[in-house]
Amino acid sequence: MHAEIIAIGTELTTGAKLDTNSQWLSIELAAVGIPVHFHSTVADNLQEMVDVLRTSVKRSDIVLITGGIGPTLDDLTRQAMADLVQEELVLHEPSLEFIRKLFEGRSRPMPERNVIQAMFPQGSEPLHNPRGSAPGIWLEVARDEGPSPCLVAAMPGVPSEMKHMFQHEVLPRLPKSDQVIQHARVNIFGVGESQAEEMLGELTARGRDPEVGITVHEATITLRMTAHGKTPDECLDKFTETRTLINKIMGQYVFGVEDEELQDVLVQKLQRAGKTVSTAESGTGGLLAHRFTEVPGFEACFSGGVIAPTDKAKTELLDISESKLSQNGPVSSEIALAMAEGCRLRFKTDFGLAVTECPEFDPDHSHSSRPSAFVALVGDGIAECQELKLIGDPAIIKSRAAKMAMNLLRIELDKV
């Protein structure tokens, strides 16, 4: 048994709005052991909607639809469902009365166009919507293949209405599964996607339980695990075993789980160690400091930061001499270390983190000339610097640089 989700709306296919309903429904279905195999997004075109529905009911046991059940001319879901089963739309008087009273309660006359919301394909059932004027539609579609019909539910596109209707009207009608599907995440930094997959080997093989997938966002790699079991505890045991293997293979590249970001882990480690940090940034415009201040309780370990995008700022705010700047240039390991030491002294912290300027570059020609940035960590007896080659998407360079600096400190704190 598996499900399919169809999101209706030209505003979704044009990119004017983001479809968050399908993501939410997939998570909810997985929680009750129903995997989702397909997501479709369709514009407000009747024939295209019917075509997608025909395909969906043939290949999926459950089809959930969001959107297109309002009163306007472009709300075509109910007509598409009627055409799917070759039935007429018929008026459901109790639903019409509910809609009328809804408008009366708002002291507004009901537009005649809203009558369409009380029309349902012959043989379907209305789904109560206490949060809006659009009832949902429940329809069981007989299929030539197999004895069981496909279960189809159409719900509003408004997330608050859809979620309530799913929980109270749709979910109780769905078949019960003897399985649950759980998800977990492990986050790593400091290694590329292809290298991580090579290191993990058979752990990322398709069909493994739990299945381990790899996604990347701004140089952070997330290992997404999906486990099937009869109980959540059974899935948890599978996650624990696989996390142990991941930690053994990936070692210090692993920094957190679930929603944890590098800054979350760093603040926890600094607090436990009773240590403080300050920052100096040229090319990241304060992003490094911003990441620290996003974490609740940062005040206990993050003392402040300096933004020094010019040589003058480096001299006046971080006490770096003009001769040192002239001799080494603003983008160098020497200046990165000097910036880290300058902020450390300025704020009297245990550690100083720094990011130099990030020179502009053309990503389409970066193979011929690859500029660099430098990140540095300074502490008592510690002076570490790393070079970051500026290649790839310029939009994420600042984030990569900030994460690289934080990762230097994370690894150092792991030694304590």
Image: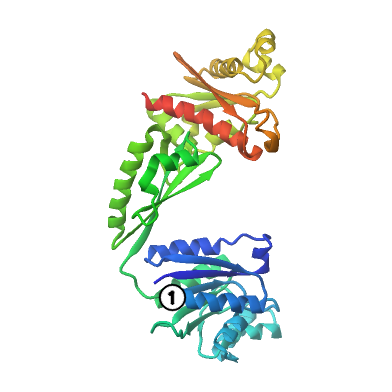
Instruction: Tell me the quarter of the picture where residue 8 sits.
Output: bottom right
Q: Does residue 388 lie above or below 32 as drawn?
A: above
State the image coordinates of residue 91 (x, y, percent, origin top left): 59, 91
- Total numbered labels placed on residues in the image: 1
What residue sits right under mark 1 in the picture?
A: 61
Residue shown at 57% from the left, 31% from the top: 401
Q: Taking the image as drawn, is residue 133 in sight? A: no
Q: Point out residue 412 in the picture as x, y percentages from the top left corner.
A: 42, 24
Badge 1 marks a residue whose secondary structure is loop
Residue at horizontal 58%, vertical 18%? 333
Lateral position of residue 148 relative to residue 106, left or right: left
- Residue at position x 39%, y 32% from top? 252
Q: At label 1, which amino acid type do we have?
A: Asp
Q: Which is more toward the observer, 333 or 137?
A: 333
Question: Quadrant of the image for the N terminus?
Answer: bottom left
Q: Nearer the viewer, residue 83 or 102?
A: 83
Q: Quadrant of residue 286?
A: top right
How busy is the neighbourhood of tag 1: few (under 14 within 10 Å), some, or many (20 plus)?
some
Residue 124 visible, this angle: yes
Q: Residue furthest top?
A: 323
